[in-house]
Amino acid sequence: MDIPAITDMDVAGQRLLVRADLNVPMAEGRVTDATRITRFAAGMKPLLKKGARLVILTHFGRPKGKVVPAMSVEPLVIALSNAMGVEVKFCPASSGPEAEAAAKALKDGEALLCENVRFDAREEANDSGLGALFARLGDIYVNDAFSTAHRAHASTEAVAHLMPSAAGPLMMEEISALTKALEAPQSPAIAIVGGAKVSTKIAVLKNLVQKLDGVVIGGGMANTFLYADGAPMGASLHEPDQVETVAEIRRLAESHNCDLFLPTDVAAASEFKAGASMSLVPADKCPGDQMILDAGPQSVERFKTALEGAKTILWNGPLGAFEIPPFDKGTNELAKKAAQLTRNGSAVSVAGGGDTVSALIHAGVKDDFTYVSSAGGAFLEWLEGRTLPGIAALMRAEIAA
Ligand code: AMP
């Protein structure tokens, strides 16, 4: 993908207007998980060393266009300063004269954090007037927030058209991992798509079956596939209105030579509850008073075999109700297999979206994957094959340059 990277540019003395995602978890005014800050800072430090001046914009929470003091980003300054190794200044505005003066006063190697961009209703409206005000804060726009790239907002889209633009280090890392896994994957490439409902992942499934060699389908959405084949569902989560969607996905898979792997045995229980008594039954024999909550051991073995020869593994969504043991077994075992193949060097594995990160942490293998994206919505939209507006704006910027 032809996107200019800020790391390839001469940044000495330049004011970089950096859109970050510093939407970190906080409790009582303190950052409780600084992972996002640490990763962002690691990419920014070399730029500061080269003499860049950083003006940082981020969103935080959902203040819905109003000033909500509890969602100020000022409490992030200490964690950000520690992570960047410089004293980060704070500006209580994100655009306008005060922000412009603060940005102008920066010296080489200094950084400024501006107030929550979502305090201004024009941000989420992708207002070009606000984009123009942002553009006055820097010389080069740098988007380092993949997780918000699926949103066309003033600080992720409008501004990119108004000044020279580039992708930041984290954005580049994410784009290159996802490109490797989906746009130009090494074959055989297999996806594991689980989670609750087919209806939330129709576009994902349709796109993946056209691009990859195989898709393992798990979770509640596998139930809908089984139901479409005539299997009784008992009390299982399934979507009868998606039967035609399932047929369409199957047709697409067949015409693109993509193998679909579905459970042939399942773990079922009468309650969705920890310690509920569980039975293993064939996938087409779910008892009337029970619900399917995980793939069974034979299915997991088949899925593992399908992964064996894969060079690329893409994962979104758990194979079962992983939050409640023992229904985490299928997810855990398959995740461990993917991790082992990655460690061996035989496969590149990329995972992300929604509950997937928690499922891989739960399985204890998150760090073994080649790349785990923490971007929920943006990751899913990428899997759907959509062009994310925040990324498209960076590409257009290069074409125009
Ligand atoms: P998603 O956000 O679509 O990836 O869905 C994740 C959720 O799907 C998790 O909370 C799982 O507990 C849930 N899930 C997975 N398999 C099943 C199943 N067989 N029945 C009910 N919920 C499931």
Image (cartoon, rainbow, N blue to C red):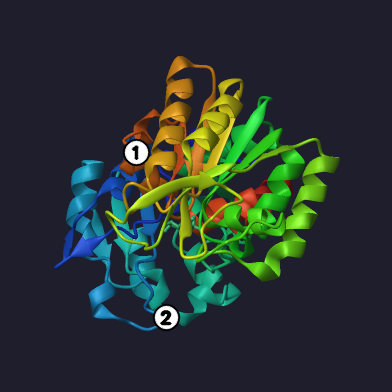
Instruction: Find residue 64 and name its label.
Output: 2
* Front in this rendered view, residue 77 or 205: 205
Q: Position of residue 227 (x, y in %)?
A: 65, 59
Name the residue type under label 2: Lys
Image quadrant occupied by the N terminus: top right
Task: Name which quarter of the figure residue 254 lies in.
Answer: top right
Q: Residue at x 39, y 28 (%)?
A: 368
Q: Position of residue 121 (x, y in %)?
A: 47, 81
On screen, residue 187 above or below 126? above
* Front in this rendered view, residue 151 or 127: 151
Q: Residue at x 52, y 64 (%)?
A: 288
In the image: residue 47, left or right of residue 259: left
Q: Residue at x 25, y 49 (%)?
A: 34
For mark 1, does the 10 Å Cα neighbourhood hold few (<14), some (14 to 19), or many (20 or more) residues? some
Instruction: Find residue 363 and name its label.
Output: 1
Mark 2 or mark 1: name the one nearer the start of the chain: 2
Which residue is farthest right?
255
Q: Position of residue 296 (x, y in %)?
A: 48, 41
